[in-house]
Amino acid sequence: MEGRRGHRASLKRFDNFFLRRIGVAMRSTARLLLLAFAALGALAAGGCGKGGAGPGGAGAQAASGERRFPLTGEVLSADAKRKVLVVRHNAVAGYMPAMTMEFAVAAGDAAAARPGERIRAELVAERGGSVRLEGIWPDDKVSLDTVDAGARMLRQDTLGKGGGAYREIGEKVPDFVLYDQNGGVVDSARFRGKQVMLNFIYSRCPVANMCPLSTSKMMATQKLARESGVSNIEFVSITLDPAHDTPGVLREYADDRRIDTGNFSFLTGPEGAIRDLLTQFGVIAQFRGDILDHTLATLLIDERGRVAWRADGSVWEPREFVERMHR
């Protein structure tokens, strides 16, 4: 049941990642590390790891005096300008009965919300009496079942490959199912027949030459590809921190940077699925407090779903990728 727990509001940060730069000259070492990494992933699925940003039990209280409660319900309306959602919610154990009320939310959550959508979130009750919602995730059965099934298949694929899970240039990339920045379900099958430029980032990354630079270079590559007549291309950034990076957080991340999401998706989902993708794409990370130390990798995937090129670190130029894209 790890998949179903992983992408709801009770997400925990994944821990026990090894921090090690993976380079072409270190592939044999990388395989050994990634085998250990996959084994640790299986242990983490049994309950090991740090506590995350999601709610604890009903009425969990922070040092600030805020109280936090799990909430489920249906979005009736969204006001992006006022950053509020009207939600018909179920009874909140230990706090309030079922009712319809207005909640303050982050800009990304307000922008991504759709009337009629079922959600799971964390209700934050402040000491002064105001309330807001955080950690909002889709909660409809079809989406949950689809994403959970994808996570289970990816887990089986990763375990089945053992030490050979790391995808070399020329090898087919794994299938996956995640959520995008609007809360929609994205099956990797949607990219078949298209080229994909893919990397891993997280929204709170404070190091200028890591995720922020990687995102800037992806944006520059998107622009250069368009100017160069490359039309059959999709850009994908997958979060390293699914405990924090909900669909709404990623929507705000993209909106703040005015990213053209017409062919640029930001993906998140179950912790186990993210961990397996990191294993297969050769990206290793480790939390140190609230900071996530991690390696960087940017890949170009061809129309057949095979790794066409890979750049480790952030020392690459957009033109290097565009030159390798098929027009």
Image (cartoon, helix red, strand yellow):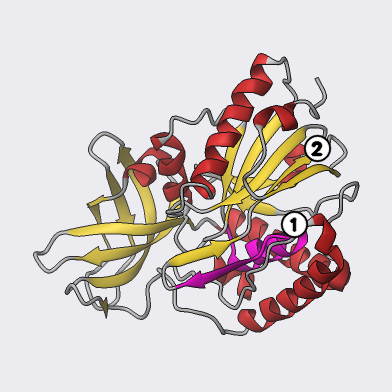
Q: Quick check: can you spot residue 13?
A: no
The verdict on residue 284 being magenta is yes
- Residue 168 vertical position relative to residue 90 in the rendered view, above or below: above
Whether residue 28 sits left or right of residue 184 in the image: it is right
Quadrant the C terminus occupies: top right
- Indicate left or right for 301 with 293 as reference: right
Residue type marked 2: Arg
With respect to residue 305, does 18 lie above or below?
A: below
Residue 160 rendering spot, x and y as whole percentages:
87, 71
Disc sitting over residue 192 in the figure: 2
Q: Position of residue 162 (x, y in %)?
A: 85, 73
Task: Report the side of 163 relative to 109 (left or right).
Answer: right
At mark 2, the secondary structure is loop
Q: Residue furthest left?
A: 128
| Secondary structure found at label 1 | helix
Of residue 9 and residue 244, the one placed in the foreground of this image is 244
Image quarter where the N terminus lies is bottom right
Note whether residue 236 is visible: yes
Answer whether residue 324 is magenta in the image. Answer: no
Residue 161 picture location, percent across and down: 87, 68
Q: Residue shown at 65%/47% (left/top)?
A: 199
Residue type of the residue flagged with mark 1: Phe
> Which span of residues is magenta-colored?
269-288
Foreground pick, 284 / 156: 284
Disc on res. 281: 1
Tag on residue 113?
A: none
Which residue occupies 56% across, 75% down?
15
Q: Residue at x 54, y 80 (%)?
A: 49
